[in-house]
């Protein structure tokens, strides 16, 4: 996945492009570059590295033009070369959003004397070969050659305008006081724009300093309705990692206040009537990364609280599967930002099969929300370093949604419903208590730091929590950690378990008896056990080296509380490793 941002206005665009590029780093981040129209053609600044490095290496880069393009990408797509992001010659500057599916065949057709190694290079060659005076027709011709797969933006030499074409994924066009913008995501436009319009697949836009003109796939002018930009902000590095943990409790409180009114679930906007729920034959959840972990947790909850068969897929697996979809299938797509390319592909596939689609995301104005028929949006702000909150937002939202569908399906009783909403109200306090730094976390962190192999394990409903904790230990502590089902780990060779740290998550009393048997075997093989459990069942276990307990809620919320405790452990392990490295440097 790559990210593009372009600007046409009356001010010098360098700082504006760098700011937009910063908001899109999660779409690439390894290779960054900008191209700005200049009197001699195009001036470019590019680097393999972060936006901060791009800024530092090009402090004296000050072209005269008022139109520019910025792009971030992954190094693999750019073959390690920063000299091609975005691509430019004396005729055009261009950036491609996504990958060109027919790259090899199109490359042979182009027969360019210049080496073509990236999507941007090929797109630039296609623009030059297909050159014509009418740039809208040029964009349509190039899009046809690309099979309308990726979107792209380009600037013709000598023209103070940016042309944008939306491919498979939509683009966002924003208008502000200083000019007109286009980007892959609305989050990149929040700082500058007062209103925005969506450029749908096959449409083209010409952006000048004072206006944007839109065209359909047949190059005919069309009118677009602009919507006001919501009062949401993009915050870059707002809090420390330790503070981020404490904001998890705030995330739970926000979800509760948004969707529970006067002691009742308020999902009227989703239009999930009793008749709609009764017609459902299956529920499918798709997501990627943390969103997949939340979807996997929700899958267990849907099976627990409804009579509807449910399955959870990684989005990359689902789009390639042969899973049969029909009108009675509800596909729930989970993505915190709502811009994950594979998740969007899954929604398109579901829509093509006439399945029902529902988005669970943080923004009503994301690409995912606009593609789905129904949107469950938390309306949280965009945080650049928000590692922990997305799982809390998505996990709790899906738990409440499962409860709502269970009520409509006449599976959840009135007593359980009332109790669940009360526990949802108290969940923020439970999370705040779970992440309090204490001696238990210190002992657990010490075990994890000293062991070479680290495993996060659980069974059934708690397994998504193990997946999420393993992911955060890798990201935050930079320590390898594998998520493995507990029943599978006990069959590992003894050599892999000797002096290893095993993080075990168990919140169910029914499974506790079997879990204790597994812990006994793991300790016999030389593993050190760190147990995450609830206060009510702690006494069920006898074999562990460290234990972290959380306050009891209900089975549908206990995994979320344990996940917050896992985040605290990841933060403590990261701090301990940093201190050890500093002590080692000081000693040397």
Image (spheres, grey):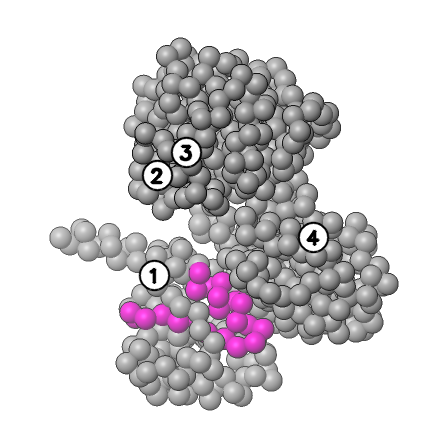
Please report whichever mark, 4 or 1, sits nearer to the chain's N-terminal start: 4
* x then y, percent, for residue 247: 55, 51
Closest to the observer: 161 or 487? Answer: 161
Residue 430: image quadrant is bottom right
Q: Residue at x 35, y 88 (%)?
A: 524
Closest to the observer: 403 or 523? Answer: 403
Could you give the CA–CA distance between mark 4 and mark 2, rounded to whole angstroms?
35 Å
Q: Dots 3 and 1: beta carbons under 8 Å?
A: no
Please report whichever mark, 2 or 3, sits nearer to the chain's N-terminal start: 3
Q: Which of marks 4 and 2 is in front?
A: 2
Q: Nearer the viewer, mark 4 or mark 3?
A: 3
Could you give the CA–CA distance between mark 3 and mark 1, rounded to whole angstroms?
46 Å
Q: Which of marks 3 and 1 is in front?
A: 3
Residue, far top: 39
Could you give the CA–CA distance between mark 4 and mark 3, rounded to whole angstroms?
35 Å
Find the magenta span and give its range: 451-471
Residue 351's label in the rendered image is 4
Residue corresponding to mark 2: 117
* x then y, percent, for residue 585: 18, 51
Label 3 crowd (10 A; few <14 / some 14-19 / many >=20): some
Residue 110's label in the rendered image is 3
């Amino acid at each position: 996945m790559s990210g593009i941002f372009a600007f046409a206005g009356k001010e010098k665009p360098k700082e504006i492009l760098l700011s937009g590029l910063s908001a899109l780093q999660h779409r690439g981040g390894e290779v960054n570059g900008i191209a700005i129209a200049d009197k001699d053609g195009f001036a470019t600044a590019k680097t393999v590295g972060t936006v901060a490095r791009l800024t530092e290496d090009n402090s004296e880069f000050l072209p005269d033009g008022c139109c520019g393009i910025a792009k971030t990408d992954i190094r693999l797509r750019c073959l390690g070369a920063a000299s091609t992001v975005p691509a430019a010659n004396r005729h055009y500057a261009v950036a491609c959003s996504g990958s060109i599916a027919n790259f090899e065949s199109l490359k042979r057709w182009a027969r360019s004397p210049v080496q073509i190694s990236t999507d941007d290079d090929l797109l630039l060659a296609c623009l030059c070969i297909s050159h014509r005076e009418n740039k809208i027709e040029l964009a349509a011709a190039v899009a046809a050659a690309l099979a309308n797969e990726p979107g792209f933006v380009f600037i013709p030499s000598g023209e103070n305008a940016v042309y944008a074409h939306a491919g498979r994924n939509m683009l966002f066009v924003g208008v502000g006081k200083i000019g007109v913008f286009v980007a892959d995501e609305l989050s990149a436009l929040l700082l500058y724009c007062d209103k925005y319009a969506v450029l749908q697949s096959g449409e083209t836009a010409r952006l000048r300093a004072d206006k944007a003109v839109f065209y359909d796939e047949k190059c005919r002018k069309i009118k677009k309705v602009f919507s006001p930009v919501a009062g949401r902000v993009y915050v870059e590095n707002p809090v420390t990692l330790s503070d981020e943990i404490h904001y998890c409790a705030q995330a739970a409180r926000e979800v509760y206040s948004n969707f529970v009114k006067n002691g009742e679930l308020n999902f009227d906007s989703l239009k999930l009537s009793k008749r709609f729920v009764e017609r459902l034959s299956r529920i499918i959840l798709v997501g990627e990364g943390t969103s997949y972990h939340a979807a996997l947790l929700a899958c267990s909850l849907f099976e627990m609280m409804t009579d509807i068969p449910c399955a959870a897929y990684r989005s990359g697996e689902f789009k390639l599967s042969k899973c049969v979809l029909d009108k009675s299938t509800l596909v729930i797509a989970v993505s915190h930002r709502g811009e994950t390319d594979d998740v969007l592909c899954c929604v398109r596939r579901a829509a093509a099969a006439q399945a029902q689609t529902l988005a669970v995301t943080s923004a009503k104005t994301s690409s995912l929300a606009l593609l789905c028929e129904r949107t469950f949006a938390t309306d949280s702000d965009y945080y650049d370093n928000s590692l922990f909150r997305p799982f809390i937002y998505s996990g709790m939202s899906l738990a409440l949604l499962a409860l709502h569908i269970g009520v409509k399906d006449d599976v959840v009783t009135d007593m359980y419903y009332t109790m669940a909403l009360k526990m949802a109200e108290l969940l923020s306090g439970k999370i705040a208590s779970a992440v309090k730094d204490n001696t238990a976390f210190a002992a657990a962190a010490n075990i994890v730091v000293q062991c070479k192999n680290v495993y996060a394990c659980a069974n059934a409903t708690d397994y998504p929590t193990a997946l999420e904790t393993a992911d955060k230990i890798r990201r935050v502590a930079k320590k390898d950690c594998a998520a493995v089902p507990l029943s599978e780990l006990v069959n590992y060779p003894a050599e892999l378990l000797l002096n290893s740290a095993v993080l075990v998550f168990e919140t169910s009393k029914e499974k506790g008896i079997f879990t204790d048997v597994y812990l006994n075997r793991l300790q016999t093989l030389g593993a050190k056990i760190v147990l995450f459990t609830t206060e009510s069942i702690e006494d069920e276990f006898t074999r562990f080296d460290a234990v972290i307990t959380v306050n009891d809620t209900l089975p549908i919320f206990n995994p979320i509380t344990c996940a917050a405790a896992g985040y605290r452990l990841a933060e403590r392990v990261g701090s301990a490793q940093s201190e050890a490295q500093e002590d080692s440097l000081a000693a040397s």
